[in-house]
Image (tube, coloured by chain):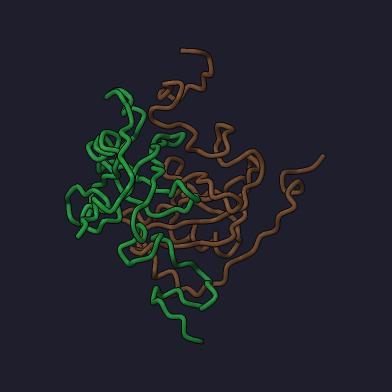
Chain colours: A brown, B green
Amino acid sequence: MTSPAASSSRIATPIAFAEADLDVVSFNSEGLVPAIVQDATDGTVLMLGYMDVTALRRTLTSGRSWFWSRSRGEYWCKGETSGDRQWVRSVHYDCDGDTLLVVVDQDGEGACHTGNRSCFYRRFDDQSDNVSGVTDTSPG
Amino acid sequence: MTSPAASSSRIATPIAFAEADLDVVSFNSEGLVPAIVQDATDGTVLMLGYMDVTALRRTLTSGRSWFWSRSRGEYWCKGETSGDRQWVRSVHYDCDGDTLLVVVDQDGEGACHTGNRSCFYRRFDDQSDNVSGVTDTSPG
């Protein structure tokens, strides 16, 4: 029996930073910054989470993606319970410093709790006219 | 002399939707939803902007990317003045409905007002140890 940790052959690569480097990031009035997570292998946008300065610091230090859950009011490390871990390869910030882009190697089935690889698996005007979010491949 | 509009060979492709389809999107307490913009050609994450329901409706209807500027307090259509237009190919929403992913064909030099193709042109621990945001390719 292997644990999710043991099943991953990937290793964490911490990103060196000085505390002053964090000043480039502008956190909003809630102390949060949106963090887009993109798959390093093919550029798929996997999800968007929110980081406060502590979650960002943990992400850089650990090489794993840490977020602040606004609904649960707690920190969470992606995949720690599901096994769908994210191994951080680079952390970018935008021209305004108010958005992060986290490039990762994604473990497991994907990033979404629904079992989809990407959280963005639904779109407007899709072929099945299905915009209600129900997965349905039947005609009409 | 050609205008930016005339210089683009791309055409707008509106995305069909019913008003009720917009109910899948959860807007925050400010009435906004973050919208990640990704390049259709190679998956580059170009920028993140914010849409309210009107900006989303305009985006779907026009096939061009519309945002709400929090700093200027006005709607803006990306590239309308710069010529760096975005031609929307699909609009996705995530599992929670609180983030959008807009896939576009990007005109011009790119999406960033700095002249960079992507707004995420800086990263922590980059090779030049340049995390202050100053573009500097000189040694040390």
- Is B131 positioned to the left or the right of A108 in the image? left
View extreme (front): residue: B1
- Looking at the image, which residue is at 45% across and 67% down? B122
Q: Where is residue A100 shown, x and y percent of the image?
A: 44, 58
Horizontal and vertical percent position of residue B96: 43, 34
Q: How many marks?
A: 0
Rendered view: A19 above or below B6:
below
Horizontal side, residue B59 vs residue A14: left or right: left
In what quadrant of the picture does the N terminus of chain A appear? top right
Can residue A27 be seen here? The reply is no
Q: Residue B62 occupies which quadrant of the picture?
A: top left
Residue A36: x percent and y percent? Answer: 46, 51
The one of A3 and B16 positioned closer to us in this rendering: B16
Q: Quadrant of residue A63?
A: bottom right
Where A122 falls versus B115 (above or below)? above
Question: Would you place residue B136 above or below residue B37 in this image?
Answer: below
**Residue B101 visible:** yes
- Taking B59 as reference, is A55 above or below it? below
Which residue is painted at 30% across and 33% down in the image?
A: B14
**Towards the viewer: B74 or B9:** B9
At horizontal 44% and vertical 61% (from top left) the residue drawn is: A53
Q: Nearer the viewer, residue A3 or B92?
A: B92
State which quarter of the image contains the C terminus of chain A: top left
Q: Residue A111: image x %, image y %?
A: 57, 42
Give the camera-side residue of A77 and A115: A115
